[in-house]
Image (spheres, rainbow, N blue to C red):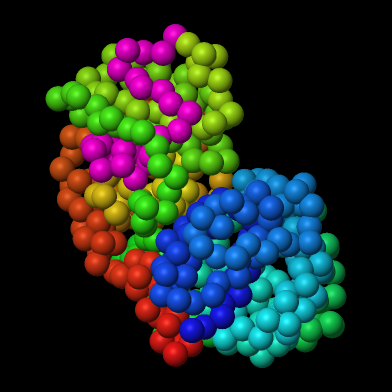
Amino acid sequence: MAKILFFNVPAHGHVNATFPLVRELVERGHEVRYYCSDEFQASIERSGATFCAYPISAPDAAEVVNGISSNLSSLVRLLLEMSEVLVPFAIEEIEREQPDLVMYDAITLWGKIAARATKSRDVVLFTIMAFNNLWVLGMRRVLEFARMAIPEFPRIVWLRRKIDRKYGPEALGKQFFPVKGQTNIVFLPRIFQPENRFVDDSFIFVGPSIDPSSRPEQDWQPLETELPQVYISLGTIHNANTDFYRTAFAAFGDYPSQFVLSVGPKTDISQLEPIPDNFLVKNSVPQLRVLQDVDAFITHGGMNSMQEGLYYGVPQVVVPQQMEQLVNALRIDDLGAGIWLDVDAGITPDMLCDALDRVLNEAHFWTKAQEVSIQSQTAGGYKGAADAIESLVN
């Protein structure tokens, strides 16, 4: 059986999607050594992989999450800085372990550099859309990104040149964010991926990586109601947004539906009172189980949450909190499976109410969500990804 070294970026959205695949590879008899930061050790070990810690501090790892949630240029600068430390570490690990395959996330720059430096066979996992052109966001947001990038640009150029001098310009390639490998596995159905020149024959679209058994068990009793059910969640990073929750209360307190609101483990639910009678508020819920029962999903638009909702055919109202989520929101709007609301313009109770009215009452949203659901459930998922990986190492 094969030995696989997997280098991932320490961010929940990029790590959580990989657990079903890792578990499947281990159950097929392969050895997976999973490199990440300490906070993910327990989850990684539950998947059956061998956890290997990066030689970075917890604040360094946390800064990745902050970079993802703030602006793209800060994230690129941070990943290049981390690569200075992690590329030599990854090369040393590859040379010592002599793996059959090196696997890494599409923004794990050190994974690509180390794989190229050691001439290793590699696979890139995309938990995001596979594109490297920001024009999909529109002129206004591209200009906004350019403005935000100005302070970071000199540092990014200096770091990139430093890497090129040490490992050669071909190690990262001309366009390096996201990276592209010899084989590229995308955890999206093909219908969700916009056409672009970045995608070629090396890309395999397997749909969402969903396996309820890979999640920690949580008690859940389905709601007993004849009313439409709506699930609201802002994901892992942005779930302390109490202002948004109060806006939702104002929007839906008298709305003829039952709402399930997940506010994250660090939110004190008592501070949200008074809570409307038609809201069930929890710090955490078994999201996959909840999504099977609901009629609409109000979400931040993180790729994992969005794909899980579409897997079960749930139309969505997307309130993106960062650039990556905005890209996702624009795509679900293009497909007709949901509506997105511009957080920068301000979200009012009336806006939320109008958006939910549409996705619940206009049948075409449900129809389009069902179309994406069928493609998601038949694309192969984590088992298809494991098949593709095995075809490379057998």
In this rendering, would 340 be left or right of 84? left
> Is residue 51 among the parts visible in the rendering?
yes
> Is residue 122 among the parts visible in the rendering?
no
Determine whether 268 is above or below 113 in the image: above
In this rendering, would 147 be left or right of 370? right
* Residue 294 falls inside the magenta stretch: yes
Decide which of 176, 229 is in the foreground and name it: 229
Question: Which residue is located at x 34 percent, y 45 percent?
Answer: 288
Decide which of 371, 208 is in the foreground and name it: 208
Question: Which residue is located at x 45 percent, y 72 percent?
Answer: 25
Residue 138 image offset from top left, x and y in percent: 50, 55
Question: Which residue is located at x 37 percent, y 52 percent?
Answer: 213
Q: Quadrant of residue 196?
A: bottom left
In this rendering, would 288 be left or right of 133? left
Determine whether 72 is above or below 102 in the image: above
Question: Exactly how many numbered labels are in the figure?
Answer: 0
**Image quarter of the C terminus:** bottom left
* Residue 376 falls inside the magenta stretch: no
Residue 153 image offset from top left, x and y in percent: 78, 61
In this rendering, would 240 be left or right of 288? right
Residue 156 image offset from top left, x and y in percent: 78, 65
Q: Report the span colored magenta.
A: 274-298
Residue 214 image offset from top left, x and y in percent: 42, 54
Decide which of 175, 294 is in the foreground and name it: 294
Question: Which residue is located at x 79 percent, y 52 percent?
Answer: 57
Q: Quadrant of residue 284?
A: top left
